[in-house]
Structures are given as structure tokens and as C-alpha cells.
Image (cartoon, grey):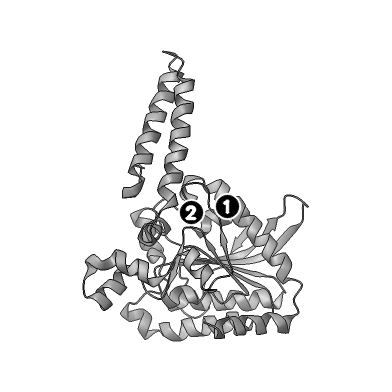
Amino acid sequence: MPIQHLEFEKPIIELEQKIEELRTFNLGGFADVNDEIKNLEAKKNKLIKDIFKNISSWQITQLSRHPLRPYSLDYIDLISENFTELHGDRLFMDDKAVVGGFCFIKNDDTGYRQKVLIVGHQKGRNTKDKMCRNFGMPHPEGYRKAQRLFKLAEKYSIPIVTLIDTPGAYPGLGAEERGQSEAIAKTIYTLMNVGVPVLSIIIGEGGSGGALAFGAGNRVLMMQYSVYSVISPEGCASILYKDTSKTEDAANSLKLTAKDLSELNIVDGVIEEPLGGAHRNMTLAAEILKKAILKNIEKLKEYPEDALKKERIEKFKKY
């Protein structure tokens, strides 16, 4: 796969290529260039810090859509054990834009294995997979599958973790004919009323009601370079400014970053990402996410059922 990067990442990529060339040269035994490699590594880390120190809302939006950013199944594979995916809404079909199943997440400090239900949006990396996953845009069947799994988790008193990463629910004619709006509303209602802890995490792109359907958690967290908004910057620029060249202005106005939404008390916390974003160190990003999940579930398990429901409802009434 060719190296994929964003425009503002180019200087970092160029340095990384130089480092890789020197490593290849070093392995060939032509000369000892270890000192030069160390100097370039330090220079690269400083460059990443400088670039990401003043990153704009639009650049964060681009990062949230980065083609190499970890998706739900990547995180599930890295943080869980014995994941068993469940399929279908029992009404029409299995929507592959939504993945869900039961698994264990092990606390490495204590050895305790926490049983959870994980439900998340899933995008694709290559053309075939993108088509199969419908670019992470669920049909009504995806939301109805999620409702079925939420109720199953409640039946067996298992905490729920939702991973949000979607441009929005699929707006096609067939989806509307099969009740897209009702499916989203019923998913929000179902998640609001389950009697188990619910942890919602925006791991990438949190777009519109398609994201909100999975966002009715007792705790709502955002990865550092994720976004959460009622509309995409492109859609906002097209509707409000009548000019798609105003996309960057729209991104800044929407207050869609983790920092913005944390300050506005829309989300409860921000999960730090590795230097340069989750796509630069997927394993470390997953480890940080895993610790955040276990920490929050442990706290939520102390709440009685009625308190969990009431807290969720009160939280979203404040929106």
C-alpha cells in the first residue's frame, strides 16, 4: 500500500523517508550512521510537536478521517479477547457498517477480565471493503441490529461500549423507505433506557444523528483528534455560506473538536492520542483507549440501574 498522508504531514513524511533510507544504508554495512539517525529522529519528534501544537479544527477533521486511522475492528482486535461478532437485525439483513459482539477486556494490572458488549461503526480501507461497509454509513438495519444487541447486553447485565466513527447515517432512498429516522430515534431511546453502564467513545468521525444514535452514554469520551458535529464542515459551508471554499471557516465555527466540546461540557473527557495521532502508533492508541474503557466502566458499575438511566436522560436534556 502506498504511503497515505495529509498535506500538513508532508514535512514529517519526508523526514521519515530519510530516516528509512539511512537505516537501509546502515543495514548494508556501508557506514555507521546511527548518530545521524538519532539526530533525525529527535528532529522528527520536535517537528511533529510543533505542527500539532497549532493544529486547526479543519486539520483535526482531516485527521479524524485519516485513511490509516484505526477503525472499530482494529481497536477490538487490539484490546479484547474472545470477541464474538453477532449479525443481523432479525428483520431484513445484516448491515456491515455496524459491527457488534461480546468480548472480554483484560486489566493487565489485576488480571481481571471485564465482559463487555462492543458496538461500533466500521469503515473500509480498500475500495471493495469501503463498498461492503458502505463507507461507515449505516442503513436502518445497522441501527436495529444495535438495538437488539443493547437489549441482549441488558438481559445479561453486561456493560456496553459504543465506538463512534461515521460521516452519518446513509441517506439513500431505500434507507428512508425502511425507516431510517425511526431507527435512529429508537436506537437513542433504547440506549437511554438500558439498565447497564454505557460508555460512548468517538474514535474518529462523529457525524450527525448517525453518530448520536450510539452516543447516548453515561460517559461520552472523544479521542484527541476526533470530531463530533451535527453536520460535516463541507455540508455546513454548502448550506450556510453557499460556498464550499468556506469549509475551513465552517469547521472552526462548528466547535467540533474534542477540546471545544469538552469546554462546552458536551463530552465528559478527552482520550490522549500518541504523538502525531492514533494512526502513527495504533498499538499505543489502543492501550490508552483500553485503560480509559476499564477505568470508566469500573466507576459506572457502582451506580444502581435507575441512577444510570436518570443520569443519561439528564445529561442529554442539558444539550
The foreground one among 23 and 14 is 14
Q: Is residue 42 above or below residue 111?
A: above
Residue 198 vs residue 127: left or right? right
x and y percent of residue 300 in the render? 71, 71
Instruction: Name the foreground residue: 14 vs 284.
Output: 14
Quadrant position of residue 207? bottom left
Mark 2 closeness class: few <14, some 14–19, many ≥20 residues within 10 Å: many
| Residue 138 locus on image (x, y percent) | 43, 72
Q: Please, what secondary structure does the residue beneath circle 2 have?
A: loop
- Can residue 78 be seen here? no
The quadrant of the rendering that contains the N terminus is top left
Residue 309 in the image, given as x and y percentages of width and height: 66, 83
Question: Can I make out residue 247 in this image?
Answer: yes
Residue type marked 1: Ala
Q: CA distance from mark 1 to mark 2?
A: 9 Å
Q: Are marks 1 and 2 in contact (CB under 8 Å)?
A: yes
**Does residue 195 appear to the left or right of 176 in the view shown?**
right
Q: Which amino acid type is shown beneath numbered disc 2?
A: Pro
Placement of 241 over or under 84, stated as above or below: below
Q: Vertical placement of 178 versus 255: above or below?
A: below
**Of marks 1 and 2, which one's residue comes earlier in the chain?**
2
Q: Position of residue 156 (x, y in %)?
A: 72, 74
Task: Pick out the residue farthest to the top.
Answer: 30
Q: Residue at x 71, y 82 (%)?
A: 307
Which residue is the site of mark 1? 286
- Near mark 1 (Cα within 10 A), the count class, few <14, some 14-19 or many ≥20, is many
Q: Residue at x 65, y 81 (%)?
A: 311
- Identify the mark at residue 70; answer none if there is no mark: 2
**SS class of the residue under badge 1?**
helix
Q: Is residue 275 above or below residue 294?
A: above
